Amino acid sequence: MIELRGLRAGYRGEEILKGVSLSFEPGRVTVLCGPNGCGKSTLLKAALGMIPRLGGEVYIDGDEIGSLTRREIARRAAYMPQERAVPSITVRRMALHGRFPYLGYPRRYGRDDYAAAERALARADAAELAERALPELSGGQRQRAYLAMALAQETASVLMDEPTAFLDVGHQLAVMDTARSLAGEGRAVVLVLHDLCLALKRADTLAVMDGGALAICGTPDEVYASGALDEVFAVKIRRALTPEGWQYYYV
Amino acid sequence: MKSSPTYSTANKARLFAALITITLLAAALSLALGPVGVAPREVLAALFGGDDGSTQARIVLYARLPRTAGCVLAGAALAVSGALTQSVLANPLAAPSTIGVNAGAGLAAALCCAIAPTAQALTPLAAFAGAMAAALLVLLIAERTGAAKITLVLAGVAISNILAALVDAVVTFAPDALNAYSDFRIGSLDNLTLPRLAAPAIVAACALAAAFSLTNELDVLMLGGETAESLGLRAGRMRVVLLAVAAALAGSAVSFAGLLGFVGLIVPHIIRRFTGDEARALLPASALGGAALLLICDTASRTLFAPYELPVGITLALMGGPFFIWLLLRQRRGRTA
């Protein structure tokens, strides 16, 4: 559970987040969307204390973030960044490094860590990639490797910045299924997504940002009904009832 | 979909077996070869029997053993230092000299040669102090802005240039220092004794232990600053710590061997082709590779033109350079480092 209260954050006097109050609740998939540059990625990083906070409060599992060390934060919330380095490391070793926040002395991973890494690999659909090095993989496969690392952290909250970028539609839906099953275990799942239709169909809570502030937050139905999406994205988004439920499309 | 056989455990075991064999063979040759040939049996007798008064035993113990030990120490320290700098800065061109180590040691040595030309024994200490001071200055400057990789590299280049200009100034005012400084700059393992190696060996051993205990941190750092932070690692601070360790390693080596820059650049590159970037394999393999390369080059520099001897820095560049280019040409797929 992560709670933001009037969070303001940014770099060197440039305020990017202008007072956002929002909570990422356990058991729910929260999707953040908004136009490019609206502060979605900044919101995720600020929620984990990775960029300077200019005001407001952040609580992770009830504790103010200022009172937690980086390691403690990493044991409570996993984060999958948008930009990913590609060192020549095997996928299995990467998943194992997901256990880094738990590493004690001597600095060696134990049996529990190896077991957690294997579970994460299987869950991220990356088990067959385990022995391969990151640079040899396709963009989508690298994504799964990073997902495995985040899952190996086994945290109560999981934040992912554009986890469906670079993925074909089948793998996009697989990521959404993984997100759903993580939420089903009582974790708070937060995704930044660009695909509005996917967001409307799969989110429990949809938070729409615009210009560093929250434009609207609610269930997809509420957000759709408010008409805020048309305004924020300057498009016309409509839906039609089909035998497979509501389908969203752009006009 | 094929697996990547390069990084399999079996291949790593084979790589280490090969590296250990090559290093031991090179060390044996380094002890046995030279202007005076010493039979393998006599080498062993000297090593385990001590000084029995024979010429052979004395040559092995007092002329060759310090040199062999110096090669192993400098080679291992420089190669691990290079592997650390390249990984931390995510820059294939990085080497210990990138963070100012060589320039700092060079200036200190030049000052020594100019001010106290008779006190040769001072040079190693001064060189080590100079190397550490320059590297720490670079780290301090970069740290003020969060120790981003590019800031570290640029600060290193700037400081190195300033120090190089100061070296030129010293040599201009004290032209007599040029000869001694030039020897230091080229790098050589001449005139070593075991007692003189003791202090650098202790520093290098501590720094190596630190580096080997931080292999997970190094891996995590290579996954990018944001990923490292999200895993609970303070990326900027860990970059500074690891580069300080790299500076101590390179500083201890150049203090007695001179500016042997090339080992730190090429050995990690060659090793990475076999181990990938995983630090727990890369660092020890680099240590072995560096020791072997320096042993081979030093033995060659003593024997190829006997009775003349080339400084090892020259042999290193002339043998290591073409070998490195040959490796690059053999590389089929373009793998980015």
Image (cartoon, coloured by chain):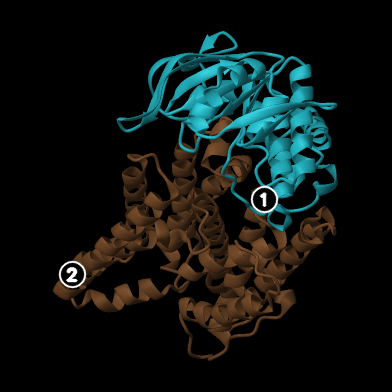
B324 or A95, which lies in front? A95
Is B50 located above or below residue B125 in the figure? below
First reached walking from the N terminus: tag 1 or tag 2: 2
Is B257 located above or below residue B223 in the figure? below
Assign a secondary structure to mark 1: loop
Identified by mark 1, the residue type is: Glu
Q: Position of residue B72 (x, y in %)?
A: 58, 64
Q: Residue at x 29, y 79 (%)?
A: B179
Q: Position of residue A73 (x, y in %)?
A: 57, 22
Chain A is which colour? cyan
Chain B is which colour? brown
Q: Residue at x 67, y 32 (%)?
A: A197
Is B176 located above or below residue B24 in the figure? below
Graded by Cα atoms within 10 Å as few (under 14), some (14 to 19) or many (20 or more), the crowding at tag 1 reads many
| Marks 1/2: CA–CA distance | 43 Å
Query: Given the image, what chain letter belongs to the residue carrying mark 1?
Result: B
A86 or A209, which lies in front? A209
B214 or B199, which lies in front? B214
Label annotation for residue B169: 2
Label annotation for residue B278: 1
Q: Position of residue B294 (x, y in %)?
A: 57, 71
B269 or B256, which lies in front? B269
Residue B106 seen in render: yes
